[in-house]
Image (cartoon, rainbow, N blue to C red):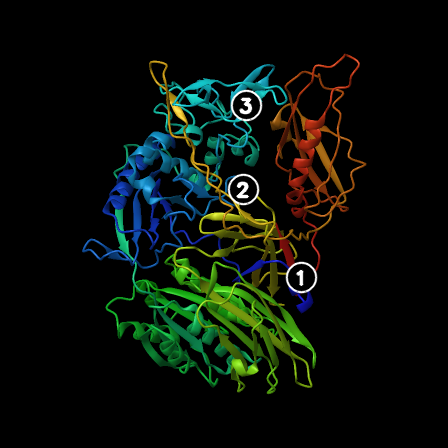
Amino acid sequence: MQRHSLAQAKMEQKWWDLFMALLLLLDVKGSLVKLHNGGYEDVVIGIHPKIAENAKIINSIKDMLEEASSYLFRASQRRFYFRTVKIVIPLTWASKPEYKRASRESYVNADIIVAEPFVKYGDGPYTSQYQGCGKKGRYIHFTSNFLTNDSLVNIYGSRGRIFVHEWAHLRWGVFEEYSYDAPFYSSGINKIEATRCSASITGQYRFATTGGRTRRCRIERHTELYEPGCLFIPYKKQTSLASIMFMQSLSSVSQFCDKSNHNLMAPNMQNKMCSYKSTWEVISGSADFASSRPLGAPPPDPIIHLMKTRERIVCLVLDASAQMGKDNRLSRLIRAAKLFLLQIIEEGSWVGIVTFNSKANIQAGLQKVFSDKERESLTSHLPTTASGDSDICEGVTTAFQVFSRKLTSTEGCEIVLLTNGEGLDLSPCLSKIQSQEIIIHTIAFGSKASNELEKLADMTGGKTFYATDSLDSNGLIDAFGGISSGSGDASQQSIQLESKAEKIASMNLLQGVVTIDKTVGKDTLFLIAWSSSTSTPEISLIDPKGKKYLNKDFLIENSNIRTARLKISGTAKTGNWPYSFKNTDSADQVISLTVTTRAASATVPPVTVKTYISNSNNSFPNPMIIYAEVSQGFLPVIGAKVIATVESTSGADIIKHDGIYSRYFIAFSDNGRYSIKVSVHGYDKTSRRIHRQNQAMYVSGYVDSTGGIVLNPPRPVINVTDTSFGIGNFDRISSAADRYEIKMSRNPLDLTEANFANATSLDTSALIPEFSGVKQTFQYKPDELAKENGTLIYFAIRAIDASDNVGEVSNIARATLLLRAEPPSSTPPFIVIIVCIAVMCAVLGIALCALHKWKQSRRESMVSMD
């Protein structure tokens, strides 16, 4: 973790800290979708609570789904269609008789979301994809304007076709076959083509001038490609059937590109990410395809259910058995549960409390949280003693009683179950749990908690967390901090700015800086805790204006829980808050700091971080990828420093500039629980927000049947830097390699994993491997190739360690050989190739991280992510 002294804090410019914890290994996303006999069931579409009520949105979604199901059936060669879809209506909309009550469906686990983007940059649909080829995405995003403004059909095509295009991203992990970054490529001498698939789609190359007029595009001699701003205008009438991932808006297009018509030369994301496989090859290699077969008659229209969300209703079910009296567990439970009640649970929620050992007791019935008064009242009902055995079924079934006293149905209610979980037996209550349609979040406290806890959370659609018994860990507080509402309203959710715990020697300091940026500051709470001393630490906290907060300003509970808390009234001041906590006891002890806040404004979303992993069922010694998504609203934030802390009981960046930071974690020592905490730090001058990638293609216009060119309005270009946040350089840590292996070919297929060994090798003996993330340059002069203008050369690289463990092949980079008109004696320049190699080396970290050379890990490992 990054350390700060008070002197350093004064020298630093504005910077912001984000913190979010993911404790235990969560799955990629809680999608409820199932495939049964070719029909996708339980597809969830969530409408954001800030979207104004509009019946036209619902009707448009229904029409889109009916068209999409039929189009998908044809595009998938009669294999797939949409059988059942659930639309989650926000609490902010009026109730209607046709609305059912949502249970485990929510906005945050929806497969498709309807929401407005922060900073209006167009209504282009897109899919959030952060894993590699063939891997599922997170969600599809439509705006309300896209669903209700029919003029956008001319730009993007019909909504049903767009839905299938985005579904292919989401479900099958294919990528775009066009490119805004490289819209054209050279296919030979004086031959320039639009980046597309298939290449049989025809059109004209035009440059828009004024008044709706166009001219022919000009060729730039230094690139031998069309000038910037040149547009590929397709003919409205086409004969090509492919491809849906290029331009599904064309009426003739009803298929994905396959091996027979795939454009290998196109510099698009599909070729880059999928090793030059066609989209249909990726789809036909999916688990969906393997479990399906062509169907006979066309399917019926989708069955659509309208599901209304309800107020959040939560019951804390807390273990008070004798095992909770060990290792300072009970006091840590009280601290964490207090923070949840005082800060985490959203205003307007209902909360109850149950404690259990061999028997369960209702400590507090459901109370609605309106203000600090109800929050403080609930904290008085937390357990203060621990004794007896533990019976989790008693606790869970008693929580059902808490719900039934106020409600006629338990659908969508939540239980937060915290237990040491030893000897867990759910068999007496399993059938009742399954019938209730409630959500159970589990917190496994201590190393002996049963694995059944994870199964319980997974079965009910809950989150699962793990906290160790280590005193210098804030894991339990972090776990409660991760249990937020599924409504999607970020302005109501608590955000952790800091979570830090260290063992401090007598008379020494825990010190550092917490920065509050301008998007947050409401309901800011500083919570300090110490492990063993009855002597309160000497507290000093200074706000950006120089105001000092000392012990007298904090609410101190120096009993068995040993905490001091300070709630800043109004909105906390923006800037650096240096702090210093002195251990005044004669012995060493652990001192911790937790800082939580909320969005400063209901209209400006805060910068947030979300954490995911590649696989929740990972087994030693297989590597796991940790992902952290940093964004403001729906705009990615890049340039952040991201650190993952992995703690046990005893990453690989996929798409650049998507605001998702990733790294392989390979230092497993054994199977079991691992907790993951991700912190993000940023500085004012190096971080920025950017547009989403993987957007549906914005069609510039068409050539009509008479040969006339009909242009659409220009693609919106929006400045996303107005409220950017500066962030410093990244730190990267990974295993080192022994040597590189670089190969080249005129055919990119020669450089795929299957054929790499047979491709032409380059001499890399002078290239000394560096750590992942370090840029390296390698110059190569292709004497053995014919020196023709426009010659295409492909390169790929992999790393090999000292034990001859071989990494995965990198993405395939392409260079175009451009020759200037010079005297025959001159040596043709090869600058393009050098640049290409430099670009290729930027992805070297992926190959380096993939090496499987296992070492005994420390109990706690820190992995830097970029």
Residue type, mark 3 in image: Glu
Neighbor class of circle 1 (other Cα within 10 Å; few <14, some 14-19, many 20+) is: few
The residue depicted at 59 percent of the width and 87 percent of the height is 534
Neighbor class of circle 3 (other Cα within 10 Å; few <14, some 14-19, many 20+) is: some
Q: Nearer the viewer, residue 732 or 388?
A: 732
Residue lying furthest front in this view? 545
The residue depicted at 56 percent of the width and 30 percent of the height is 276
Percent across and percent down for residue 31 are: 41, 51
Residue 790 vertical position relative to residue 623 in the rendered view, above or below = above
**Looking at the image, do the residues carrying marks 2 and 1 touch, with CB atoms under 8 Å apart?**
no
Residue 473 vertical position relative to residue 197 in the rendered view, above or below = below
What secondary structure is marked by label 1? Answer: helix
Neighbor class of circle 2 (other Cα within 10 Å; few <14, some 14-19, many 20+) is: some
Percent across and percent down for residue 800 are: 73, 42
Residue type, mark 2 in image: Gly
Disc 3 versus disc 2: distance between alpha carbons? 32 Å
Nearer to us: label 3 or label 1: 1
What secondary structure is marked by label 2? Answer: loop
Tell me which label, 3 or 1, sits earlier in the chain.
1
**Residue pointed to by mark 2:** 132
The residue depicted at 61 percent of the width and 85 percent of the height is 533
Tell me which label, 2 or 1, sits earlier in the chain.
1
Q: Nearer the viewer, residue 686 or 463?
A: 686
- 361 to the left or right of 224: left
**Residue pointed to by mark 3:** 227
**Looking at the image, do the residues carrying marks 3 and 1 touch, with CB atoms under 8 Å apart?**
no
Tell me which label, 3 or 2, sits earlier in the chain.
2
Disc 3 versus disc 1: distance between alpha carbons? 46 Å
